[in-house]
Image (cartoon, helix red, strand yellow):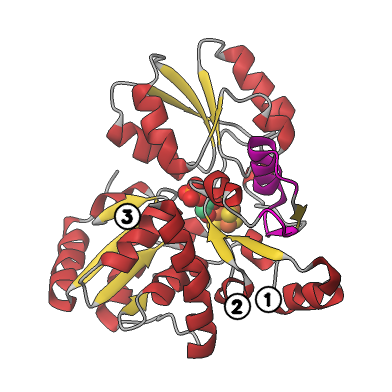
Amino acid sequence: MTVSHDLISEIKELKRARNAVILAHNYQIAEIQEVADFVGDSLGLSFKASETSADVIAFCGVHFMGETAKILSPSKIVVIPDINAGCSLSDSCPAEKLADYLAEHREKNYYVIAYINCSAGVKAIADVIVTSGNAVKIVESAPPDRNILFVPDQNLGAWVMEQTGRKMDLWRGNCYVHVEFTRDSIKRIKSERPDAVVVAHPECTHAVRMLADEVCSTEKMVTFCRDNSAKNFIIVTESGMLHRLRREVPQKNFIAGPTDHCACADCRYMKMNTLEKLRDCLATLEPQIHIPEDVRSKAERSVRRMLELSK
Ligand code: 13P
Ligand code: SF4
């Protein structure tokens, strides 16, 4: 990793001057993970965003993550390095489309469970939010007499149904990164490394999850690999996770899960963030996350319900 020490010093100095905290998702580039105050999954980052005493949250992840921080900490300034860092999964379920669908299916009286990878508008419609780290627990606690609509990830939703036995209607969205892993690409790496344990994210397809020894959130991957007696692990999720694992579990060997045409899978949105853009957003306090208050306050109810149910 060749990083300018001046740039790192500049970021640290701006962070101090702004009384800022830098939060980074596990899929961020190594250099950003190294300079962050906290690196974690969507659930851990949500808790951090709700608890911080900083004046400014610099959120290195994608747009919906910055929005979640603003939903939970409306009095703070939330900046993100690149305003165009979106998410294919979030985009697959626009709030207006969800509202229309619910209006068309009023007879179902849906209890709406939304994966955190969605816009503030969708969070405002949902009854409760989940992450991959708490989805099973939260679905288990859903009202037993209600029909559930799970949005927007059909793969995570299908995995939660398998785990809980609870029937849900699934929105047909997916993460373009995780569906790049295929039965063939994972079978190939398994045959090359028969000694390795396969750990996959639940956003992967059913065919890929069936080949995994463990299916879990990115945060759980850290504890699973640390506590498992195996030495080698094939990690079937976005490539940034490999840095977090190598840093926190240095005694083990991590192999990136391949796709049909690449040795690993990068999320083009997560990778839009750079140290230079992080420096600039701390310097200018732009781009900032703004959410209309009526949407934010409704979204806060469903996100806080998740935090309560996760304790
Ligand atoms: P988690 O880190 O919460 O497992 O989520 C993965 C993801 O795809 C975020 O975009
Ligand atoms: Fe969205 Fe997938 Fe990228 Fe996560 S990895 S931010 S779900 S596109």
Mark 3, Cα crowd under 10 Å, few <14 / some 14-19 / many 20+, is many
Picture quadrant of ligand 2: bottom right
Say which quarter of the image contains residue 112.
Answer: bottom right
**Residue drawn at the location 28% of the way across and 63% of the way down:** 22
- The reply, left or right, for residue 285 in relation to residue 46 is left
Is the Cβ of the residue at disc 3 closer than 8 Å to that at disc 1?
A: no
Number of marks in the rendered image: 3
Q: Is residue 257 above or below residue 7?
A: above
Task: Tell whether circle 1 marks a residue whose Cβ is less than 8 angstroms from ligand 2.
Answer: no
Q: Is residue 158 above or below residue 280?
A: above
Instruction: Of the two numbered discs 2 and 1 on the same chain, state the one appearing first in sequence.
Output: 1
Q: Which residues are magenta?
A: 144-167
Is the Cβ of the residue at disc 2 closer than 8 Å to that at disc 1?
A: yes
Res 268 seen here:
no
Residue corresponding to mark 3: 32
Q: Position of residue 37 (x, y in %)?
A: 23, 56
Q: Is residue 18 magenta?
A: no
Amino acid found under the numbered disc labelled 1? Ala
Q: Residue reaching furthest bottom?
A: 293
Res 294 seen here:
yes
Q: Of the numbered discs in the image, which one, if any, rests on residue 121?
A: 2
Amino acid found under the numbered disc labelled 3? Ile
